[in-house]
Amino acid sequence: MQKMKDDYRYLFDSAYGSTNHFLARWLFLRALGLIYFSAFFALLFQIRGLIGTQGILPATDYLQSVRALGLLRFWYVPSLLWFSGGDRMLMTICWSGLIASIVLIANVWPRMMLLVCFLCFVSFVSVAQDFSGYQSDGMLLEAGFLSLFLGPSGFLPGLGRKQPPIRAAMFLLLWEWFRIYFQSGVVKLESGDPTWRNLTAMYEYYQNGPLPTWIGWYVERLPHWFHIATAAATLIMELALVWMAFLPRSWKTVCFFVVTAWQAVVIATANYAFLNYLVLVLAVLLLDDAFLQRFIPILWQKKLAGNALDGKRETIIPAGATMASSLRGGIFAALLVWIFYATCLPLVEMFWHTALLPTKPVAALEPFRIANQYGLFAVMTPHRYEIEFQGSDDGQHWIAYPYRYKPQALNERPGIYAPYQPRLDWNLWFASLGSWQQNLIVPRTEESLLRNDPDVLGLFAGNPFPSAPPHLIRVVLWQYWFSTPEQKHSEGVWWRRQLLGTYAPTLSRLPNGQFGIVDEPTLDAPLQP
């Protein structure tokens, strides 16, 4: 019994927490605040066009559709928008999350700011429907929730030396980091994608991702042996190297520098929003204070003296344990164990498909996105398709709506936008790989453009019909390729493209305000590789 008590305290009691991770925790929480900031900052300019009352997928309509669940709706759709789904509440959530992230960066009342950030972001994700189906959203929610148990309490905690990091919370954050890599490696092999088996997955990777960068254009020009080597290195890192996280500290330090360098290259060659930044930040927890204090300025080291930065064991016993604090600690421990089980089961099932283990604990947490299964790039995209909205007043002359971030103009250099995430641009990339029937955001966007809806138009770089909406809106599909070096040199273009046809029905607005189909699409099924 005493052994169980000692193990419980070691894992779940801050008084017995890790005394050599004060700096790592401090750095991690400041960086997490920056990532939350990037997420809310991007939503400030997009949320009304995405899920506002006049947006593409209004949150109010979605909330109304799930009211039939009764009181269960608050569990299955955990969102502050139940109080109000209007535009003012949407902006309140964004501003609240943005301000809380800034305060978190400043290390003021960190645990409360983590809670505000989490509540605001889960409120958006729960009702954003197609616009929150990304693995990166789940990664941030999982990391943000677990950080509630990691962050020190108090208004100005500094390093929080009286509250060492809870070991179980630190482990689960590193467990999330490990699963992002390892599960991604497993799904690459399980998917049966031949490009991973023959190591050709990277040949056109830089061109075919959601939002390529100009650096990716140059990297794709490198010899095939380089791309074969990077494909092999990806599998080695995801399936083997990440196990170093469970080895002694010197191995962890080496692992940190390898994966950090890798993520820096990914950030430079592709725009995956805050995903790679978050994976990079989680790796900070691989480091301890004995390593990090070498990089602290001498003046700071004096201030940090006495903070147990030498990594020696220092048990900090609370002045008086109360029944309330014991009960709270028990609830925290139960939640962390629940999350560990909910994240272990999908990993077990990847190797043991017939495992007869309870799945209800996993399903119960799904609405909150705090215990996720990951798997990036299981199947590589073989081609690049681009959806383009065009308007016309006569059905003969069509003008394209310009995007802010997606490839469109052939001579426009691909930019580096991450961690900013343009969610419509991202969703249209996914939509281009399927049919319009599977992606209702496309006809919904057509309808919004026929109304000249200002919030939806704000998701584009400009409005070619500022005086009045066009009579017709159509959606065409292009295939894009990076230009060749010769084309770039002679024509000054980064892209070349070919028109494939119309992707969705051409719409017009009828006198009664409804929308009518003028022409059916010429492409009636997803394009095959």
Image (tube, rainbow, N blue to C red):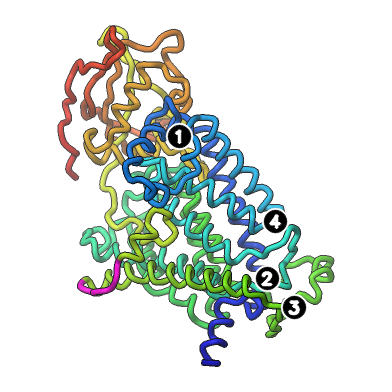
Sequence-wise first label, 3 or 4: 4
Label 3 – label 4 distance at C-alpha? 22 Å
The residue that disc 1 covers is: 405
Q: Mark 4: few, some, or many residues within 10 Å (few <14, many ≥20)?
A: some
Query: Is there any visible trace of residue 483 in the rendered image?
Result: no
Tell me the tag on residue 125.
Answer: none
Label 1 – label 3 distance at C-alpha? 56 Å
Q: Is residue 366 above or below residue 346?
A: above
Tell us which disc is closer to us: 1 or 4: 4
Label 4 – label 2 distance at C-alpha? 16 Å
The residue that disc 3 covers is: 319
Kindly identify the amino acid type of the residue bearing the numbered disc 1: Tyr
The residue that disc 4 covers is: 109
Tell us which disc is closer to us: 2 or 3: 3
Kindly identify the amino acid type of the residue bearing the numbered disc 3: Ala
* Residue at x 60%, y 75% (from the top left corner): 326
